[in-house]
């Protein structure tokens, strides 16, 4: 659902060490501050500044990005397969499972569309000096330049995009950023096949893929520990080139993401509850206030799950067989807020670097964000690989993710509220016409 923060109550963890998001914030502020001093005090043309960025800050940024890209294929494949296979109770729960999947896709799609409309309407990343953006692209990243070249060579028409979703060579798709949507489609089909095939061999394979997922998350967690230093390098490089203009664009980006999340939370969920679930939006939001507060304060949907389960029973009066299944599955497979955040972020960075995206490329962004909602790792900044992946697909320089990391914690808290509320909303919609039955455990199995 989100990037959990199990120690969100203070600045330090129980062992006395500073929490990661505070380290990232410090790296962000220090890098920005020093970069602004250099920009206005010395100038980006100074020889020592160019040597520093060329041989120190930029190489470290590139290594960090390479580590992120290295983990994309195993992480997304295993996360998607595990996320879909966790719906293994679809067969036994029948319409509850399929309606959960349908409403998850519909609400995720609505979230991404809303985010893309708002970022196109308000253009938070537009207006940056294109010459400076091109200079950063030329200096900073041979990798990003290669991605842009690959993207420009590919056919981005709608028909080609639709045909390319189904891969003729899965290994080839895995090795090509522009074809990663095909790999995600294969992973989705693979997960569905595991749901529909019930045999000891498949269960063994599922445990193996779950192991791959756990290993991938562990490695991502180790890589993310470098994020404070990478953010310092990202922000220093960007501030040296763009000065205060960088702060203005970043502030506009945060506002667009936040208000898009608020609109989706209040308007989209209310309409869906009223017209799909036949449920009163006012009664719903009154009933879930506690879960929303816990979600915002902890930035962790996993930490909020026990509260959500209790409120579904006590405040909303939902059938337990529905709420247990929907909320447990939704904790990993329904991430409306994260999908919206990823879509807005990619288009913001495209505007910032002056990369024009066609309507079909934006459709591709939308599709990957919906699938990425299932395949986002539950670690701090777990959506980072998905954002980097989509940037690579559409030719946006991925080093821009340094801006996102610097303001990520507040946006994470905000989108976790949307994610958790969406789980409860889907549970309310699926409950329409259902009656309570035997109590279910967290995996939907009867316990009484």
Image (cartoon, grey):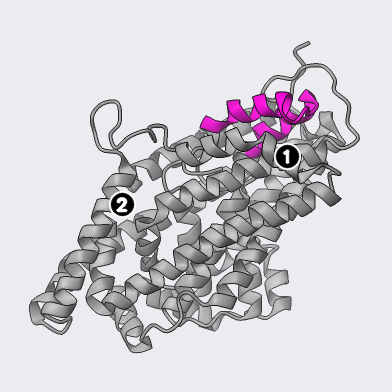
Mark 2 highlights which residue? 227
Residue 58 at x, y = what percent? 24, 68
The residue furthest top is 448
Q: Is residue 52 above or below residue 317?
A: below
Q: Residue at x 82, y 16 (%)?
A: 438
Q: Secondary structure at mark 2?
A: helix
Task: Indicate which label's residue lies in the foreground, 2 or 1.
Answer: 1
Q: Which mark is residue 284?
A: 1
Q: Is residue 290 left or right of residue 137?
A: right
Corner quadrant of residue 332 = top right
Q: Position of residue 165 (x, y in %)?
A: 68, 65
Query: Which secondary structure class fits the magenta region best?
Result: helix
Q: Closer to the N terminus: mark 2 or mark 1?
A: 2
Other residues around mark 2 within 10 Å, as few (<14) / some (14–19) / many (≥20): many
Residue 322 inside the magenta-drawn segment: yes
**Residue bounds of the magenta highlight:** 303-330
- Residue 155, compared with residue 56, is above or below; it is below
Q: Quadrant of the C terminus?
A: top right
Between marks 2 and 1, how big is the CA–CA gap?
A: 38 Å
Q: Which residue lies most toward the bottom here?
A: 131
Residue 427 visible in rendering: yes
SS label for mark 1: helix
In this picture, residue 435 sits left or right of residue 324: right
């Amino acid at each position: 659902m989100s990037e959990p923060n199990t120690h969100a109550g203070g600045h330090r963890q129980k062992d006395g060490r500073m929490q990661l998001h505070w380290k990232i914030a410090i790296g962000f502020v220090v890098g920005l501050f020093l970069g602004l001093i250099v920009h206005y005090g010395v100038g980006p043309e100074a020889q020592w500044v160019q040597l520093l960025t060329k041989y120190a800050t930029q190489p470290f940024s590139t290594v960090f990005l390479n580590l992120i890209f290295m983990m994309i294929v195993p992480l997304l494949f295993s996360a998607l397969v595990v996320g879909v296979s966790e719906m293994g109770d679809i067969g036994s729960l029948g319409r509850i499972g399929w309606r959960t999947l349908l409403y998850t896709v519909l609400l995720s799609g609505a979230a991404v569309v809303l985010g893309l409309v708002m970022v196109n309407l308000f253009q938070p990343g537009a207006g940056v000096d294109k010459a400076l953006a091109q200079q950063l692209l030329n200096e900073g990243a041979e990798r990003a330049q290669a991605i842009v070249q690959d993207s420009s060579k590919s056919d981005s028409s709608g028909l080609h995009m639709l045909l390319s979703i189904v891969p003729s060579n899965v290994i080839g798709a895995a090795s090509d950023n522009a074809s990663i949507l095909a790999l995600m489609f294969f992973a989705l089909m693979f997960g569905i096949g595991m749901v529909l095939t019930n045999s000891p061999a498949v269960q063994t394979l599922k445990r193996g893929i779950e192991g791959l997922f756990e290993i991938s998350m562990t490695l991502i967690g180790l890589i993310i520990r470098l994020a404070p230093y990478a953010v310092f390098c990202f922000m220093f490089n960007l501030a040296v080139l763009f000065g205060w203009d960088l702060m203005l664009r970043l502030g506009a980006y945060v506002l667009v993401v936040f208000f898009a999340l608020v609109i989706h939370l209040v308007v989209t969920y209310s309409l869906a509850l009223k017209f799909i679930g036949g449920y009163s939006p006012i009664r719903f939001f009154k009933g879930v206030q506690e879960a929303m507060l816990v979600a915002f304060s902890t930035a962790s949907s996993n930490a909020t799950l026990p509260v959500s389960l209790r409120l579904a029973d006590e405040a909303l009066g939902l059938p337990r067989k529905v709420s247990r299944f929907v909320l447990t599955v939704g904790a990993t497979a329904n991430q409306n807020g994260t999908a919206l955040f990823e879509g807005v972020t990619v288009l913001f960075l495209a505007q910032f670097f002056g990369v024009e995206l066609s309507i079909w490329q934006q459709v591709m962004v939308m599709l990957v964000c919906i699938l990425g909602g299932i395949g986002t790792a539950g670690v701090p900044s777990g959506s980072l690989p998905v954002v980097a992946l989509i940037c690579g697909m559409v030719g946006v320089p991925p080093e821009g993710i340094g801006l996102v990391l610097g303001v990520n914690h507040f946006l994470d808290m905000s989108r976790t509220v949307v994610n958790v509320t969406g789980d409860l909303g889907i549970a309310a919609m699926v409950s329409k016409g259902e009656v309570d039955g035997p109590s279910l455990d967290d995996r939907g199995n009867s316990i009484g």
